[in-house]
Image (tube, helix red, strand yellow):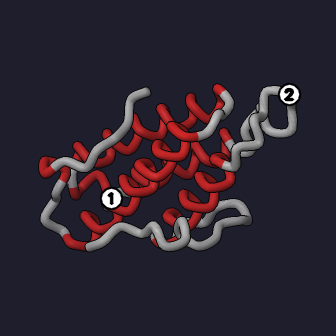
């Protein structure tokens, strides 16, 4: 499984954007750690890998891209089209709780930027917020 790590090359110099990107990277790291310790469905694996690709694109394109409407839009669309996972409430579901953790974290992250999403959301992964 490929995971995302924050790299110095992702720093834009804009404190607001860098902080927001670091929160997204931390969320993905937290989900990655959960996926390594719990049995989960293939749908969760695929959603995670897709989001890693979208996040890497966001991080590598810099400040102008992140400030554009399309940057958060790609993540919002991914959430809308992928959640709830198809495996949810089927025999393929491992009832691991990772998709709930992911959904709460990503929706909170989107709402922090005043991006409207479908109902839900919650606190950003409890006390696992990244240090600044």
Question: Where on the picture, by quarter, is residue 105?
Answer: bottom right
Residue visible at 47% across and 45% down in the picture: 33
x and y, in percent, of residue 67 in the image: 31, 61
Q: Is residue 70 visible?
A: no
Q: Is residue 55 visible?
A: yes
Tell me the residue that label 1 is attached to. Answer: 21
x and y, in percent, of residue 6 in the image: 25, 49
- Viewer-proximal residue, 108 or 93? 93
Residue visible at 62% across and 55% down in the picture: 101
Q: Badge 1 local density, few (<14 within 10 Å), some, or many (20+)? A: many
Residue visible at 35% across and 57% down in the picture: 68
- Left or right: 47, with 24 as reference point: right
Question: Where on the picture, by quarter, is residue 111?
Answer: bottom right
| Callout count | 2
- Left or right: 125, with 39 as reference point: left
x and y, in percent, of residue 121 in the image: 65, 66
Residue visible at 52% across and 63% down in the picture: 110
Mark 1 or 2 closer to N-term?
A: 1
Residue 91: numbered disc: 2
Residue 117: numbered disc: none
x and y, in percent, of residue 89 in the image: 86, 38
Element at label 2: loop
The residues tagged by marks 1 and 2 sit, at their Cα atoms, a distance apart of 35 Å
Q: Badge 2 local density, few (<14 within 10 Å), some, or many (20+)? A: few
- Viewer-proximal residue, 71 or 11? 11
């Amino acid at each position: 499984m490929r995971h995302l790590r924050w790299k110095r090359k992702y720093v834009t110099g804009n404190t607001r954007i860098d902080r927001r990107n670091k929160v997204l990277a931390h969320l993905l790291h937290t989900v990655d750690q959960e996926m390594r310790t719990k049995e989960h469905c293939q749908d969760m694996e695929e959603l995670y890998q897709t989001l890693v690709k979208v996040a890497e694109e966001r991080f590598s394109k810099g400040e102008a891209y992140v400030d554009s409407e399309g940057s958060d839009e790609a993540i919002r669309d991914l959430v809308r089209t992928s959640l709830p996972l198809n495996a949810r409430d089927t025999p393929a579901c491992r009832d691991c709780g990772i998709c709930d953790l992911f959904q709460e974290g990503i929706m909170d992250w989107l709402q922090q930027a005043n991006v409207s999403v479908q109902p839900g959301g919650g606190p950003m992964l409890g006390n696992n917020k990244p240090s600044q």
